[in-house]
Image: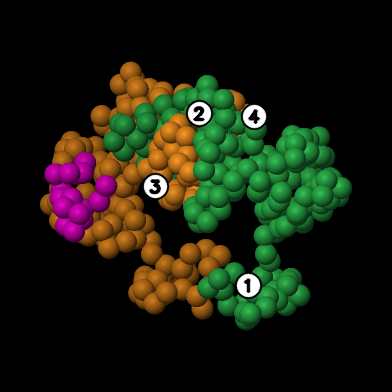
Chain colours: A green, B orange
Amino acid sequence: MLLPAPIQNLINAFERLPGIGPKSASRLAFYLLRAPEDIPTQLAEALLAFKTQTAFCPECFNIMLNGREHCEICESPARDESILCVVEEPMDVLAIERIGAYKGKYHVLHGVLSPIEGIGPEDIKIKPLLARAAQGQVKEIIIATNPSMEGDATALYLRQQIQPLGIHLTRLARGLPVGGDLEYADQNTLLRALSGRQEMG
Amino acid sequence: MLLPAPIQNLINAFERLPGIGPKSASRLAFYLLRAPEDIPTQLAEALLAFKTQTAFCPECFNIMLNGREHCEICESPARDESILCVVEEPMDVLAIERIGAYKGKYHVLHGVLSPIEGIGPEDIKIKPLLARAAQGQVKEIIIATNPSMEGDATALYLRQQIQPLGIHLTRLARGLPVGGDLEYADQNTLLRALSGRQEMG
């Protein structure tokens, strides 16, 4: 038996999302067959609206409402514009904002350098970052790329480019995750925790 | 920082789907921000179309294209109408059709009896099943509810109702899953495999 086309189309559309395989896709589609009407409608409307109603901030490349000049963070006078935190994706901004401890501004690269995937400095927002750095008001740049091979390569590339500008350059600390267990930490994490050991004052 | 409303709406809509928590929902939304335009559009269109374009077969309650009189299986002259396979959900029909060995017809209950959730015989498609059984052409009914507490309770209830009609009543075999390992089988499965042991002919 072939599934009726409208259901098969829905399964196919779900399958194109990351992390949703054929089984989850059909489970979702069959769930929606019996779910309250507004669940699929609400999702459909949100899917159609979000692209036209959002844009990237021309200053920091975080997401913002379409039609605004800059994102909320760039526009806020409460944020310290002498510190920039450089992240890979808009989601990372959200993660850092959630801790509520950072009062500087951001710069979203929209990717990382990855020679294997053919992603070079021109393909991510490095040039606009260097332009912001060269304007003079930035005193510290915190590199907050992921602790991955590509994240590290991107951090090293940025160091090369930013060091000549005489800006204080830092990066997020590596070490044992809080609540983690030393016994289960991988060798690299343990090595970083050891070599980066902090004074107990 | 609050997320722009269109993104937050999209995250909320994803979160209403089963098996998608807050983290997966935001990952999906942020993925779609950078994904090819047609991925969200295709999903939105499929979501809006499937409800109006499908319906349940009035005979077996499987899904069918809206506007047809019956589903493909009920309409097919190649299917043996003397055997009915009773399943919980339309997805189960798909699972049995995939093995390609069953040539009878189906009956989809759209649920199982569950006193805890307040689901009684009137809430699922038991009456129409008994009506089909009473018409006379059905010689065997295969109960293919899930091997769960609710599935078993539903099977027992159906036996009570169907036995007086003098129809041959069977249910799917319980035992070791093919490719499984006896050592890892749970006690109940092993007990069922032993008590239901089959002749080697």
Residue shown at 66%/41% (left/top)? A108
Look at label 3 and name its amino acid. Pro
Secondary structure at badge 1 equals loop
Look at label 4 and name its amino acid. Pro
Residue A171 location in percent, x, y? 71, 58
Q: Which mark is residue A65?
A: 2
Whether labels 4 and 2 belong to a single chain: the reply is: yes
Relative vertical location of residue B187 with respect to residue A51 in this rendering, above or below: below
Q: Chain of mark 4?
A: A
Task: Judge the density around disc 3: few (<14), some (14-19), many (≥20) Cα neighbours within 10 Å.
Answer: few
B123 in magenta: yes
Q: Which one is in front, A107 or A165?
A: A165
Could you give the CA–CA distance between mark 4 and mark 1, rounded to whole angstroms? 36 Å
Q: Nearer the viewer, mark 4 or mark 1?
A: 4
Secondary structure at badge 2 equals strand
Residue underneath mark 4: A58
Residue underneath mark 1: A176
Residue B196 location in percent, x, y? 37, 70
State which region is magenta: B111-126
Look at label 1 and name its amino acid. Leu
Residue shown at 32%/47% (left/top)? B87
For marks 4 and 2 on the same chain, the one whose residue lies earlier in the sequence: 4
Q: Is B113 left, or right, of A179 in this rendering?
A: left
Q: Is A180 left, or right, of A151 in this rendering?
A: left
Whether labels 2 and 1 belong to a single chain: the reply is: yes
Q: Chain of mark 1?
A: A
Residue underneath mark 3: B18
Q: Nearer the viewer, mark 1 or mark 3?
A: 1
Q: Quadrant of residue B11?
A: top left
Q: Which one is in front, A163 or B51?
A: A163
For marks 2 and 1 on the same chain, the one whose residue lies earlier in the sequence: 2
